[in-house]
Amino acid sequence: MHLPPDFNSWSCPLPLRSYPSIVMGHGGGGKLSAELVEHLFVPAFRSTALDLLGDAAVLAQPEGRLAFSTDSFVVRPLFFPGGNIGTLAVNGTVNDLAMMGAQPRYLTAALILEEGLPIAQLGVIVEAMANAARAAGVQIVAGDTKVVDKGHGDGIYINTSGIGVIPAGVEITPTQARPGDVVIVSGELGLHGIAILSVREGLEFGSPIASDCAPLHGLVAAMLTASPALHVLRDATRGGLAAVLNEIARSSQTGIVYAERKLPVPPAVAAACDLLGMDPVHIANEGKLVAIVAPEAADAVLAAMQRHPLGREAAIIGQVVAEHPGIVVARTGIGGTRIVDMQVGEQLPRIC
Amino acid sequence: MKYLDEFRNPAIAQQLFAEIHAQTTRPWAIMEVCGGQTHSILRNGIDQLLPPSIELIHGPGCPVCVTPLEILDKALAIAAQPGVLFCSFGDMLRVPGSTKDLFRVKSEGADVRIVYSPLDAVRLAQSHPTREVVFFGIGFETTAPANAMAVFQARQLGLRNFSMLVSHVLVPPAISAILESPQTRVQAFLAAGHVCSVMGVQAYEPLVARYQVPIVVTGFEPLDVLEGIRRTVRQLEQGEARLENAYARAVQREGNRPAQQMLADVFTVTDRSWRGIGVVPQSGWRLSDRYREFDAEVRFAVQEIQTQESPLCRSGEVLQGLLKPPQCPAFGRECTPRTPLGATMVSNEGACAAYYQYGRFRAANAAANAL
Amino acid sequence: MCLGIPGQVKSIYEVDGIRMGKADFAGIEKEVCLAYVPEIQVGDYTIIHVGFAITQLDEASAQESLRLFSAMGMLDEELGHPAQP
């Protein structure tokens, strides 16, 4: 399931086989550009709007309120255990929409390619985007490609924007955490960040550790069915659980307390964090959400999550309190307390 | 993880806390020398569960905090030179020099890379023969054997494009300097376990004898730290001053001989300036003359560096336990974790950053209670 | 200073004339330098700092510490000390 990408088995659909890599002309708007679009993007993404190849996608107006979001993706390495930048780019925006309770419908995809990127790699990434979009039930309806000189990009950058429809009656906003609310995480923490770090730091895992990159709107739908009393949803991406809890505490002017021993941290993530001097609550996830739920709804929501494949390990980790507004406090393993702040910058391996 | 999880056992931690509470009858000021211990104390909330009469003073055992400004400015100057590939442990990238830090130099075009091991820097030198690869060799006695091996191996491999900016510091002279200070409040020390794994414990015997202070070699997991504190308090309460080893699974009396031999070959003891404290005689290592060609200070013309420490920063007094962070006039005003004036505000376990965090917590709690 | 983590030696080999090996940390393997622990064997535990084994971990001593910790608890109960601070 988590095999390294196989570029050899991918056969290039482009007629101009003399270019095994991206050249500047692929972004020049001429024949090379057109070939990329016609032979690579359109067949992969297959949507009515895209097939028309107009200057803009033309979409029917859905009922209700829309959620609209955009995100750009830069990641090194481009390919990592459990996915690649293409899977991230689709699921990242799908999840941003899902955190507002929206059903994701349409995505756009803009790719900045670095001259020299092997076409086979681009092919695998595009295929991964197409598969992720299919799995999430969204259509990629518009796109763009530009090429930058070699040395001016990390192979490929992707921006996706997405539109989703919010069902009537769903009202999820970051400011709604109330004292007494329960804090739930949807599963094991730190997998994406450690999968990326394992490649960068040369860690080998006896049992495979793979990015948790996944679309979360199905899980959110299941939670909303169990109870509409979801106050806040956030996906715990960059900055990890700590960043999300801090943002919720600040925007709702409440305090948050959680117990470290209740955090679902896989042993391999814990070991990698010990080794590199990091903290699992600061490690990125790409398929985990934090839910702030009214106490009376917590059991029903938790049960619904645990029935869903992406929420089996869901756990109640703490609660919202009136004390220390804007501040997140952890009860440590030995019974002490500590403040859990956001990282100032990115988390770095430390020696001391 | 084996030999890690067992030493985080909450039930035994409660027993150790109970022991310490039962033993303590008077106020005691204990310095944990090592930044790793400070990290463990704050990370686990140990300080809040101790008797209020036990004060833990965060010591100078954090290379991030004590690397002198002059060396940092040299690092920044070298990293900015064309063709240089500058390698550092992640810890050092946010530490402010006179005007900027390594992140800023990187953003201005320098090639600054984070490495996990000094041998990674040697490999970069092998794979980038046309670049000058410079490794920022900071740390205490624990890190020194790794850095020494990198230099040794660069010479074995005949690498002419590898050099090291060395700013190694030694623990015993720092303890000595703290005890020599007439204002010192420190009554006992938790010595740094992994430093002793390398160097052994003999160097601390004369300190115990001369200054009549208990020194307990202590590890880093919660139970290790608590056991170190328990033994220290027991000695203090009984009026004893002995050297004890509370980290026997990792510390032999004589230390690591092969590592010590490598250190004696590659490094030479030298006077070293500690940030905020000043020059402590014979408190550091530089490359020995046999390895002079690998000295980045010699290879790059950076001898004449003018440094400018913020006049507001009093981190030196904090590091010696003479001043509590909130007593510094710049604390929380000009100096915050986002805009650190001195290194003690940079790392999360720096004394000032730690106080800043808990201060915020207390202030918020007080505000909530007042409502 | 000095983050050091216990790992178990899984293999020993030489790279560029230096004794290296793989150490296991709860299922994670990482290459480490074993030059400073010439006596260490596959299966032994060591403490790793910045990719270097700085000492062999004395397993008997570790067990002894844990035994003493447990004994202390039992002694406390006999003496009627409170279990909570």
Image (tube, coloured by chain):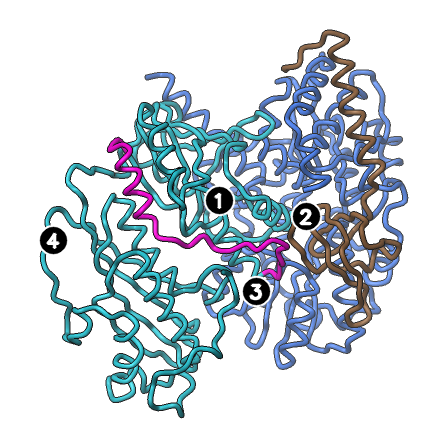
Chain colours: A cyan, B blue, C brown
Protein chain holding label 3: B
Circle 1: element type? loop
**Mark 4: amino acid:** Pro
**Mark 2: amino acid:** Trp
Q: CA distance from mark 1 to mark 2?
A: 39 Å
To the question of a shared chain for discs 4 and 3, the answer is no
Number of numbered discs on residues = 4
Disc on res. B113 = 3
The residue at which mark 1 appears reads as: A189
Up/down of B82 relative to A77, above or below:
below
To the question of a shared chain for discs 2 and 3, the answer is yes
Disc on res. A269 = none
Q: CA distance from mark 4 to mark 3?
A: 49 Å
Disc on res. A62 = 4
Q: CA distance from mark 3 to mark 1?
A: 27 Å
Work out which residue is located at the far top of the displayed protein and give it: C80
**Mark 1: amino acid:** Leu
